[in-house]
Image: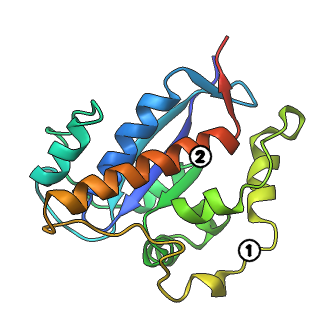
Amino acid sequence: MTDPRRLLVVCTANLCRSPVAEALLTRRLADLVDVDGRTWTVSSAGTDRFQGLAEPDTVAAAAALGLDISSHASRQLSGDDLAAADLILTMTRSHVRSVVAIDQSAWPRTFTLKELVRRLQTPAQPGDGFAGWLASATDGRRAADMLAPSEEDDVLDPYRRGRPANIAMVAELDWLIAELLSWGPWERAN
């Protein structure tokens, strides 16, 4: 059996956005394979050094969707994480810049979640394989477009902003991930 591909989700502290995205992606990818027949594993990390458990308001907001992230402990992003990842999804443009600052070779496989969803215009084709899908997602992409923050690409950080901000973040990630999986290179496993 072929090793699974790896999807890495990155945010700042790995306390709110990336743990929720990791849990959502893990749940939704559990019954899927990519167009090459490969399964996926999901992990998350933060660009900054923080230690702690997931934010309590985030835990509560995620629980409303049936996600248990209560035991999630933050961890800092490493070069090894980036080298092992087949696809890297960040929560903001600044996270893309942080990833590429650590490993320049990660650029072609690193996107903000919003950017990747926006760039996907047609479903993946089985004959293209994952590599072809990824290449089509990067077509016409420019690193200069990632220099400034943008609501178009950034998922708002709800850290210490209360339950309503966390509920909004969880809902946004739930919708974005549903869109990603509907346009991405995944299909039901046989």
Question: Residue 145's image quarter?
Answer: bottom right
Residue count near mark 2 (Cα–Cα under 10 Å), binned few <14, some 14–19, many ≥20: some
Residue count near mark 1 (Cα–Cα under 10 Å), binned few <14, some 14–19, many ≥20: few
User: Does dot 2 land on a helix, a strand or a loop?
Assistant: helix
Depicted 41 relative to depicted 37: above or below: below
Q: Quadrant of the C terminus?
A: top right
153 vs 171, left or right, is right
Depicted 68 relative to depicted 22: above or below: above
**Considering only order in the chain, which callout, 1 or 2, is on the residue closer to the N terminus?**
1
Q: Quadrant of the N terminus?
A: top right
Query: Which residue is nearer to you in this view: 15 or 103?
Result: 15
Residue 143 x %, y %: 65, 81
Residue 185 x %, y %: 71, 38
Tag on residue 28? none
Query: In the current view of this chain or complex, which residue is farthest to the right?
Result: 127
Depicted 155 relative to depicted 35: above or below: below
Q: How is the image coloured?
A: rainbow
User: Does dot 1 land on a helix, a strand or a loop?
Assistant: loop
Query: In the current view of this chain or complex, which residue is farthest to the top?
Result: 190
Residue at image location 48% in from the left, 47% down from the top: 175
Residue at image location 62% in from the left, 56% down from the top: 117
Q: Foreground mark, 2 or 1?
A: 2
Calculate the distance from the C-alpha at mark 2 to the C-alpha at mark 1: 20 Å
Residue to which mark 2 is pinned = 179
